[in-house]
Image: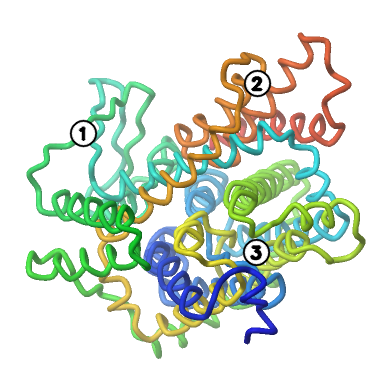
Amino acid sequence: MENFFKLKENGTNVRTEVLAGLTTFFTMAYIIVVNPSILSLADMPWGAVFLATIIAAIAGTLIMGLFANVPYAQAPGMGLNAFFVFTVVKALGFEWQEALAMVFICGLINILITVTKIRKLIIKAIPESLQNAIGGGIGIFIAYIGIKNAGLLKFTFDPGTFNLFGDPNVLTPVLEQVPTAAGLLPLAEQAVETVGSTFTAVGGSAAAVPALVGLNSTPVLLALFGLILTVILMVRKVRGAILIGIIATTLLAIPFDQVALGDVISFSEAVKQLPETFGAIFGNPGLRSLFSDPGRLPTVLMTIFAFSLADTFDTIGTFIGTGRKTGIFTDEDMKALESSAGFKSKMDKALFADATATSIGAIFGTSNTTTYVESAAGIAVGGRTGLTSVVVAILFALSAFLATFVSAVPSVATAPALIIVGILMMSAFKEIVWDDFDVAVPAFFAGVFMALCYSISDGIAAGFIFYCIVKIFRKETKEVHPVLWVSTILFILNFIVRARLGA
């Protein structure tokens, strides 16, 4: 184990890696139940998606750990699954099998651009100031997820600035579950004018105003307890402080009836349903019908493009934001990324692992699999090698049989961990020369905008666009890497495509 994962070389040990794996798993375990709850709204069988979610997470995370030897976990991505349901299936009218086929193609494209070194060229082209902004921005982003998961925020809509859609008895439980489990607001936005009368959604405008909730409810008080406890443990430099905070808050939540055993389908029943989604992409509907109608071809291509661009830059942003500062991707590794052929560097291997996971997940029956930003929680407690990922994969495998208990860990217990990790990651902002306006503008959009838009890729897009604007009007266009120009143009096209798709 020492020789395979090079623990001493990476300044870690088995105990630390196991602790990191446990921490990462519990901060992202919500996906086991939430992903099938969302995709089932597209008439996909809940049990099949439940197993596909776990299988995709195991496969992607094991490849990340055993091939790349880095402490990142993968699973179907939040936001992309909502786009899959509300835009691709509900709004555009594709069958879910065809939507899965587009996800599969997206994975193949990501494999292609990884093998052909396009991804590494993108990373090389990003200036250092923007890389630091992405790192700090992911800190704000993950802390914001934690604040929302803790239930500390409420949103007020002005009269006439929102719409309600459909039967309030159908989707309400899911809409209640997702914001507390993953802080997902895009569900409401993407559902505007896209869902039928049998669904419920809230479509709101920018008039929504956030505010602090009253500190008088049991869940909020439990989250505050967990946050204060974790801060104290971190200040005292207690090993495993973040995981201890999660466990202590969960145990305290039990007598207050805040830990509920989920009503999850049995493993045997899920196995019976899996054939309904496994390999469905290759049938009709599926790949065989996706390109049969020439009139739909532009929409198909635009949708695949939107899937691929978001997936690619979410991953790049996560790697840059969490891997450079912690030393997971060292300067030597980054030089090898730029100069070596094949898969010599950790970053090369990690990018390939991420690319393959999406296609694997689509074959089994789930939307885009991506590298989880919650991996930063495990990295924060010392995870540095693929052993962390292997531990996460094992826990996902066990969750197929113990999902009822895994899903019982409340979001108020994991929220403090995300807030603490966000605080730690924001130190990347100190490397940015904020008193230089030319530097500050793109850094702001790449960092702060990322959290405000609740999207890593949108934040990177805004940073790229304003970086190019600054350089154009400073007459310094020669300083912009050609790949950055191309990426910026693609981002602009993506915004146009999304506007046309209504996403």
Q: Residues within 10 Å of mark 1 (few under 14, many from 20)?
A: few
Task: Tell me the CA gap for discs 3 and 2.
Answer: 35 Å
Q: Position of residue 272 (x, y in %)?
A: 46, 87
Q: Residue 104: percent from the left, percent from the top?
A: 69, 63
**Residue at point 67% right, 77% down?**
6
From the image, which quarter does the C terminus lie in? top right
Q: Which residue is mark 2?
A: 439
Disc 2 secondary structure class: helix
Q: Amino acid at mark 1?
A: Leu
Task: Say what secondary structure mark 3 lies in.
Answer: helix
Q: Which residue is rendered at x = 71% and y = 56% of the image?
A: 330
Give the answer, above or below, for where 395 lies relative to 96.
below
Label 3 or label 1, whichever comes before in sequence order? 1
Q: Residues within 10 Å of mark 3 (few under 14, many from 20)?
A: many
Residue 210, how many percent across, how many down?
A: 28, 29
Tell me the distance, in whole angstroms, between the alpha carbons under discs 2 and 1: 32 Å
Do labels 3 and 2 touch, CB within 8 Å?
A: no
Verify CB contact (< 8 Å) between mark 2 and mark 1. Answer: no
| Of pointers 3 and 2, the one earlier in the residue sequence | 3
For label 1, the residue is 212
Could you say which is closer to the camera, residue 366 or residue 355?
A: 355
Q: What's the distance in space between the residues labelled 3 and 1, CA to CA? A: 37 Å
